[in-house]
Image (cartoon, coloured by chain):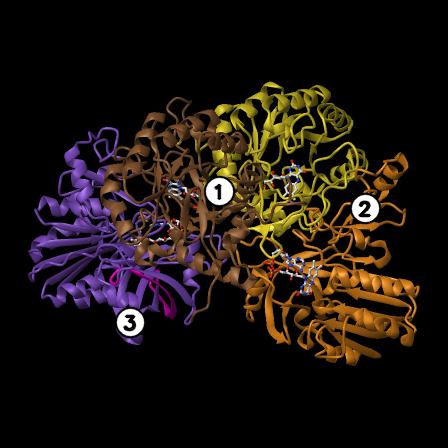
Chain colours: A purple, B brown, C yellow, D orange
């Protein structure tokens, strides 16, 4: 057992709040709080011990505070049975939480200009990231989008933390009517951004990567794939990702991600096995590639 | 405190394991990820993801769907190939003090033999498990080796002949085959030292929003507590038919009581599969609960439980 | 309010039912008990408990055990015999305006024929369902007619020849048979106008206090949401093989969405079984939810859903 | 749909109390309260909508009151997952309750002397029965047993309602050490009882039937068989019972019972199919018996 890996704890709920269209749950979880780095997520057991819904639900960590030895907050919208159950939790209920999981956002060494792009609840992990970046002296700009005003995530905090904050909604009820990518180019130019960080639906990540790529700005994306385990053992959460060696692998979003470099994710091939992926029908195994593989570490 | 707990040791073919709780193939990688949650050397053994000869990219996503008390999955045995496993993952597991049951999956009878040879040449493997739920290239699409007792026997025979003596060969069976007991007998006659059962059961879920099957490819494998009664029934029937053959029982194990249930049905060891997804500490917890259950009942030797539910009145 | 809802009518063989929600055999008696919770005439039909020629006392207790999202049962088809049913229960159901699919269970091929003759002679039956999960006296113990496509076909052929024309004969299939698709084809060739699937799946639970099987006789039949993915997979595969044959899909139906799922997989009608035990109003609720789901999606005709999940990409 | 049959309602919990080793839950369920007759039971859905425990749990009704339009109380001890879940319910939670189910205790026409015998939680249904009997001018005597003092059910109310109340415990911690049947004979003699009513484990019912039978006193017993449906459709709850026609049938405890005449239950054959039961291997079907069968009503 290693010491800085994730931990599994039954943690008391500190509080459950409504925030616009979302619920925010804060749990007391010192072990997770102290290990957390922004971009990482937690998974939560839902439904109790005799629930028919077996699988844990993954949520990005939105905030970590030192209170009570360390608290962790995540936000969610009610989608199905698991999130409906979570929304009914009350203070002092116990939740079974595993975390922190996944690779965090890589942070720049230097105080560069960063624009953080979030879609819907995908805004969540960008807030601890913004704080880390600010601590390193980075300039932070926000672009947050959503279907409607109540789905644009934490507009107030964004304004508070960031140099500038732009908002978009599909229905025009708040900020610019349209998509985050409709304003991203302008923000990158005005803020002279050196790096983009994005989290949200796959379609949005693809578009953000394209906008940033066309301006030569590197992008880090955090993906949300369906996950059965979150710990790297089930192989259900895969995304086609090109490695530094040029080989495409079916990478596990939970341990190889959720953060990837945008240009390495083969967005067009998500939901398929690209013909040339390692071990796909079109892949020609070379002993060199296999040797490279065996040298790679798994987590 | 000097208190002597129950004797948990069990024998699988010629090999002794310190206790009967192992991982199920494909539900624990090669042990490294779970070792972050409990000491991987503390459980009976790690059964690895099924290894193929070549790297394999597996099936497209979506690869899983949740179902009542279960899940459907279709990973298509994605993996780096057996050599990478033997060079990278196996040494790690052994260095941690863990035991490895290496699962192999061939695309043909001959490939199973080659896999067995390579695994058998590696140091420190505890047993080879033969995943018979692999597509048989000689049969109609969708048919596995396990669907044909003859073909399954051919695979087991080849694996046995390529595996050094003393290293047990376990045949992994499925529940949804034409005749499970006949399959079990064929595998034992072909040289299997033990049997593992059950693999996932073919099933489907349809996403009623998109009106498409919820996992890519349509059919997936159902696992989890939902299938436990099927699995217990299979272990019971096979133990009745070949009582001398050790069985690794699995299918929806969630608690120490479930281990008792499988052992009473006839299993010598019990594997935790899907439950490790929802509870990464599950193997250690299940072993602890099982030990406590033995103590509470005053059972001194875990091995004494094997087949306890058989006898008059329980016949089927 | 004059609002026209979706057209719920479906056709099973030559017979039209007002909507696709029916009861599963053995999970609704002959409708009388459930009629205390909802209007039994409001659902598509009542499929009766399987009727035998003679009164049958069934199996000893304990007859049931709860399992994760399911239950095991073994009632052994207890019943008063077909004549009592035809004289006492059928007239009551018809007098209430209900429709009856009469399930029959013979102890041999000839008896199935006699059952069919008697049911066929009665007035007002909507269809005959042939329970093929009955022990075949000509096969080894524990084997059902459904386990052998030839024997199953012999039963269906006999029932068809003893049933008046115009009265549909439905063959009820099980999932745990050697080759489901072959069984389905045999039954259709033997004259089945439709297929019902799936029956319960053989399984076992062991009571770890007594270390004995939890239901008398050891093996029981697993039912409930736990088996829904198996059932949906079966319906999908059989609909793919014989798309022109109507199927009554069942296995763990709990909500209107589940009806959508079965119909998308290829079912023309959908039966509620175990859920009626836990929710006696279930049939009416499921029908209401299904109707609402159609409205929400703007589907005008329920029958249009049949097989909607088939097509490119969903093949298996 | 008939009007005086059972109903299914989502009822609010009024309160949950601990009573010795038991929990008492009161729900607001006017439809059930108004239909209830003593000896009947309710079934309760457990675990919520996404529970893996599908089946309803049966409980005898312990009390019915006119408050809030009609309340129903049942008592239970925690045995497994369902009762554990029930014990955690709180006021205002909703429970899915079906009832009243089963045949009630037949009441004597005349003001006769009745002794009511309960084992453990089997005492519960005897309290509304005692009240009905008192209202008819019957003399009521109680014999209540349990493993220990805290499992002897409602000793105080028993003393209040009944002429006499005798108690037994296995461990002697309260009343007489021993079984209810150790004192029953004496009570019957002293109270000159004309009828016995009993509820509890099958073994106890057998012994009570024997004691009463040897004194020529008729017994009504309420059995507790495992029940999957409680409404008569699953055929899992069967008990071998001899009918008035001398034919043994596998009777459904839920609708043909739970109350039977003690001497009609074939206690020695519970858990078997008696060889001579209707439709058993040894049963010789006669057309007369079949005609009788077809004339019987089913519920
Ligand atoms: C790394 C990661 C981080 C996430 N962070 C957040 C967050 O901060 N806030 C938030 O609201 N949501 C987040 N999600 C999505 C969130 O996990 C799903 O909304 C949630 O699992 C839905 O559960 P349910 O039971 O309500 O839905 P159901 O539809 O009943 O769930 C059924 C199954 O599908 C899975 N599933 C359903 N929707 C999604 C989805 N969008 N993504 C992944 N799995 C899904 C569930 O986990 C479950 O296994 C994140 C997902 C991932 C992978
Ligand atoms: C007509 C009737 C009236 C009853 N009245 C009362 C009462 O007033 N108070 C009380 O405490 N108990 C009563 N019982 C027993 C009560 O139903 C069980 O204690 C309860 O079902 C246990 O549920 P569980 O989930 O806690 O146990 P589990 O063991 O987890 O239950 C598993 C399954 O077994 C069944 N089961 C377990 N124990 C029993 C049992 N003793 N009898 C019947 N089914 C059982 C459950 O219903 C469930 O289906 C009554 C039973 C019947 C049939
Ligand atoms: C995601 C997943 C992957 C699996 N991969 C394999 C595999 O590679 N080889 C194998 O023999 N069984 C595999 N199995 C089957 C399990 O080993 C086990 O037999 C089955 O899941 C039943 O156990 P469970 O219900 O505890 O999961 C896999 C199961 C799952 C859910
Ligand atoms: C208690 C019980 C009794 C049953 N009796 C019969 C029967 O007499 N004939 C039959 O064809 N199927 C019988 N079945 C099977 C059901 O009709 C149905 O096929 C199966 O239970 C799957 O559906 P479900 O999961 O909705 O219950 C029975 C099932 C149960 C649980
Ligand atoms: S969710 Fe299991 S490997 Fe990623
Ligand atoms: S419990 Fe179902 S018939 Fe009695």
Identify which residue is drawn at 68% across, 74% down. Answer: D148
Q: Quadrant of residue D81?
A: bottom right
Q: Residues within 10 Å of mark 1 (few under 14, many from 20)?
A: many
In the drawing, does residue C20 fall left or right of residue A299? right
Position of B149 relative to B173 (above/below): above
- Indicate yes or no whether the magenta region holds residue A55: no
Residue C93 in the image: state x and y as whole percent: 74, 39
What residue sits 53% from the left and 40% below the top?
B244
Residue C260 appears in the figure: yes
Select label 1 or label 2 by which is in front: 1
Task: Provide the secondary structure element on which disc 3 rests.
Answer: loop
Q: Nearer the viewer, residue D149 or B101?
A: B101
Q: Is residue C23 left or right of residue A166?
A: right
Instruction: Determine the secondary structure under disc 2.
Output: strand
Report how far apart the C-alphas of labels 3 and 1 lie in the structure: 48 Å
Which residue corresponds to mark 2? D249
Whether label 1 touches label 2, CB < 8 Å: no
Residue D198 lies in what quarter of the image?
Answer: bottom right
The majority secondary structure of the magenta stretch comes to strand
Looking at the rendering, the stretch of residues picked out in magenta corresponds to A3-23
């Amino acid at each position: 057992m290693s010491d800085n890996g994730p931990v599994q704890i039954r943690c008391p709920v500190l509080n459950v709040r409504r925030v616009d269209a979302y619920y925010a749950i804060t749990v007391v979880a010192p072990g997770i709080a102290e290990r957390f780095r922004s971009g990482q997520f937690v998974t939560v057991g839902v439904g109790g011990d005799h629930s028919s819904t077996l699988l844990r639900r993954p949520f990005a960590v939105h905030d970590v505070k030192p209170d009570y030895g360390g608290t962790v907050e995540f936000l969610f919208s009610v989608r199905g049975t698991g999130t409906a159950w979570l929304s009914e939790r009350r203070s002092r209920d116990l939740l079974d939480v595993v975390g922190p999981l996944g690779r965090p956002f890589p942070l720049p060494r230097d105080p560069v200009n960063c624009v953080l792009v979030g879609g819907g609840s995908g805004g969540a992990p960008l807030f601890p990231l913004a704080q880390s970046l600010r601590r390193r002296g980075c300039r932070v700009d926000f672009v947050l989008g959503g279907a409607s005003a109540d789905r644009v995530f934490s507009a107030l905090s964004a304004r508070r933390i960031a140099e500038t904050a732009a908002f978009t909604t599909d229905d025009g009820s708040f900020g610019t009517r349209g998509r985050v990518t409709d304003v991203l180019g302008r923000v990158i130019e005005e803020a002279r951004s050196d790096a983009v960080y994005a989290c949200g639906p796959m379609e949005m990540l693809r578009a953000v990567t394209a906008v940033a790529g066309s301006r030569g700005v590197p992008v880090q994306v955090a993906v949300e794939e369906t996950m059965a385990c979150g710990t790297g053992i089930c192989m259900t959460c895969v995304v086609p990702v090109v490695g530094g060696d040029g080989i495409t692998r079916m990478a596990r979003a939970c341990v190889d991600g959720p953060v990837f470099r945008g240009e390495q994710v083969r967005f067009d091939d998500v939901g398929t096995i690209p013909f040339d992926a390692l071990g796909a029908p079109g892949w020609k195994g070379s002993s060199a590639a296999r040797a490279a593989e065996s040298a790679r570490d798994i987590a | 405190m000097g208190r002597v707990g129950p004797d948990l040791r069990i024998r699988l073919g010629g090999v002794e394991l310190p206790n009967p709780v192992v991982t199920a193939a494909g539900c624990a990688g090669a042990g490294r990820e779970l070792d972050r949650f409990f000491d991987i050397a503390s459980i009976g053994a790690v059964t690895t993801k099924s290894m193929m000869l070549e790297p394999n990219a597996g099936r497209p996503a979506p690869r899983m769907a949740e179902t009542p008390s279960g899940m459907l999955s279709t990973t298509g045995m994605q993996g780096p190939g057996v050599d990478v496993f033997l060079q990278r993952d196996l040494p790690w597991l052994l260095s941690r003090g863990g035991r490895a049951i290496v699962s192999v999956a061939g695309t043909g009878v001959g490939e199973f033999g080659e896999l067995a040879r390579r695994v058998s040449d590696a140091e420190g493997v505890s047993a080879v498990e033969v995943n018979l739920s692999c597509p048989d290239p000689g049969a109609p699409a969708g048919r596995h080796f396990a669907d044909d007792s003859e073909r399954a026997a051919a695979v087991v025979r080849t694996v046995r002949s390529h595996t050094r003596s003393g290293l047990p060969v376990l045949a992994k069976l499925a529940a949804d085959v034409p005749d499970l007991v006949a399959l079990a007998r064929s595998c034992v006659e072909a040289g299997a030292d033990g049997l593992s059962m059950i693999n996932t059961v073919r099933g489907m879920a349809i996403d009623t929003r998109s009106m498409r099957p919820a996992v890519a490819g349509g059919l997936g494998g159902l696992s989890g507590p939902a299938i436990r009664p099927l699995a217990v029934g299979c272990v019971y029937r096979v133990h009745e038919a070949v009582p001398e053959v050790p069985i690794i029982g699995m299918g929806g194990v969630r608690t120490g009581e479930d281990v008792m249930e499988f052992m009473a049905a006839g299993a010598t060891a019990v594997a935790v599969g899907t439950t490790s997804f929802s509870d990464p500490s599950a193997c250690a917890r299940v072993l602890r609960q099982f030990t406590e259950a033995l103590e509470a009942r005053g059972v001194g030797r875990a091995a004494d439980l094997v087949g306890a539910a058989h006898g008059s009145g329980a016949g089927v």
